[in-house]
Image (cartoon, grey):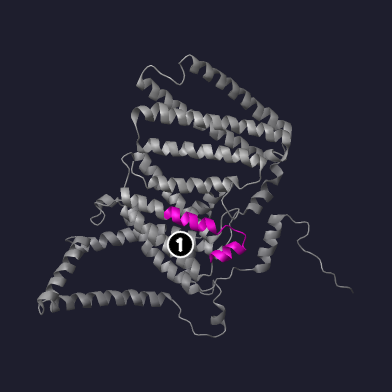
Amino acid sequence: MDNYNFDQTAGLDDYEQEMFRTAQMGKPYIPNKNIFRIAALVSYLVGFFYYKFVFGTSPADSEIFKNHVGLPYFIFGLLFVAGCEAFAHFTQNSYEDIRKRNSSALEGVIFMVCVLLQSFALALWGYREDSFATVFQVIMWHFTIIYYVLARCGTLTAGKSGILLPLDFLEGTVIVPLGNFPLRIETLFQKGDMKEDGQAAAGQKTFKITARGVVTVIFSVIVALIVCLYALSQLSTVSATFSGLSDSISKFLEKLVGDDIAEWIITNLFDFAVSIPFSCFLFGLVAGSLKKKRAEISEACFNHYTKGFHQLPAYSAYIIIGSVCFLYTIFFGTALYDFINNQGLFASTAHEASVRAVDSFWSLIRVVLLNFAIMAGSCLFSRKALWEQKSTRIIATLLFVFALAFALLGLYNLCVVYMGEYGFTAKRVLSTWVEGNIIVWCVLMIIRLYKKIPAAQIGIILGAISFSVVMCAKF
């Protein structure tokens, strides 16, 4: 009987081919389980520091960071980035490996720099005077860290930044960390869950971390600490110089733990217990991404499950976008009339000008975001993307020309009418940053309609870089 070679993936879409290849590969290969065990132990300390000084307790309430409330963010940022880079390096997840998987290695570097810049800005200026600006800055700092992990591990949904950004944040905040929440316990205590290194399998003797070994190390450290403290107290009576050194160490420890060491131990044990879910989240995010080396919901998976949504014909876009553009035309006609009669962009008093500027700013922002939502909806529900047909391309161009005009009008109201009268504040600077990014995105979208460029990727990267740079300024 003749043997025939045939492609088993013929006729399958990208997602079905991806699932076929995954089934053929079997379990993911983990180069060295000991690296995961070490990272699991380190994550307890990192999670404790995060909860103690970044999340759970205000740095202002800490004796160490009382006068430097932003310093814990900088320390955590450095520790987290260094830990992720070391973890990825020792598990053979290099930038070159990310390139081979057709993912963007450069974005891992870019978002690492953004994390460090934002951490440095928090250490340099601390919290902003405006509470909204402070909350916004801290939230963006967290999102940047999560996005850095996904980019560094090569597990972004499309392999790079793009229009599937909401899915990336769903992966980074929910699916990956919570899906791998028990991974640390499995790593430390479960045997045979991960494949060992090939050399170890061949019989080469390797060092293994076990639960018994961890307990032994902790016990030994406690005993060593007790012995050293006793020896320190005895030797301080022998030498005056050593006694001075002993006094300096005692003062530092007193400043660190306070007068009541028992209370300090109990408080920190409680904080450590509460920090365990946070450290599980952090370890699950990083280790889960490194272990799987691909997104839980890939671009091919998203396209596979949404291909049935592409039902609307081109004339549907004419009706929806045409109606909106007609409304926009009427608006600009009335705005021009108000401008000519000094009733729109001008005002009789400064207070009236400020009220109009603030109200119009947020209204214009919402209208611009509506335009982007229309574009996203067309990509999801139209049979063909708007830029694939000449007629729909023209009407989409008109939509974003209006969006650009709205964004410029909002920027004028904010910077000239309002900030020109009342000056700069943290909230106004952040609002200007939002407006500037929307203008850039509108321009990129118009270019994308006529030339195939990674518009969404460029917009996201520019947004992250510009925000990080702006945060380094004093305002």
From the viewer's side, name the closer residue of 140 and 434: 434
From the viewer's side, name the closer residue of 347 and 280: 347
- The three-letter amino acid code for the residue at tag 1 is Phe
Residue 68, compared with residue 131, is above or below; it is below
Q: As drawn, is 144 to the left or to the right of 317? A: left
x and y percentages locating residue 238 in the rendered image: 10, 80
x and y percentages locating residue 426 in the rendered image: 36, 38
Q: Find disc 1 in the rendering and name its residue.
A: 283
Of helix, strand and loop, which mostly describes the magenta segment? Answer: helix
Residue 6, compared with residue 295, is above or below; it is below
* Residue found at x 28% / y 61%: 268
x and y percentages locating residue 453 in the rendered image: 63, 47
Q: Is residue 377 magenta?
A: no
* Residue found at x 17% / y 76%: 232
Residue 55 seen from this side: no
Q: Over which residues does the magenta segment extend? A: 94-115
Q: As drawn, is 427 to the left or to the right of 308? A: left
Mark 1: secondary structure: helix
Q: As drawn, is 50 to the left or to the right of 266? A: right
Quarter of the image for the N terminus: give it. Answer: bottom right
Residue 414 seen from this side: yes
Quarter of the image for the C terminus: give it. Answer: top left
Dot 1 alpha-carbon crowd within 10 angstroms: few under 14, some 14 to 19, many 20 or more: many
Q: As drawn, is 349 to the left or to the right of 413? A: left
Q: How many marks?
A: 1
* Residue found at x 41% / y 58%: 277
x and y percentages locating residue 206 in the rendered image: 48, 82
From the viewer's side, name the closer residue of 268 and 97: 97
- Judged from this view, the residue extending furthest toward the top is 341
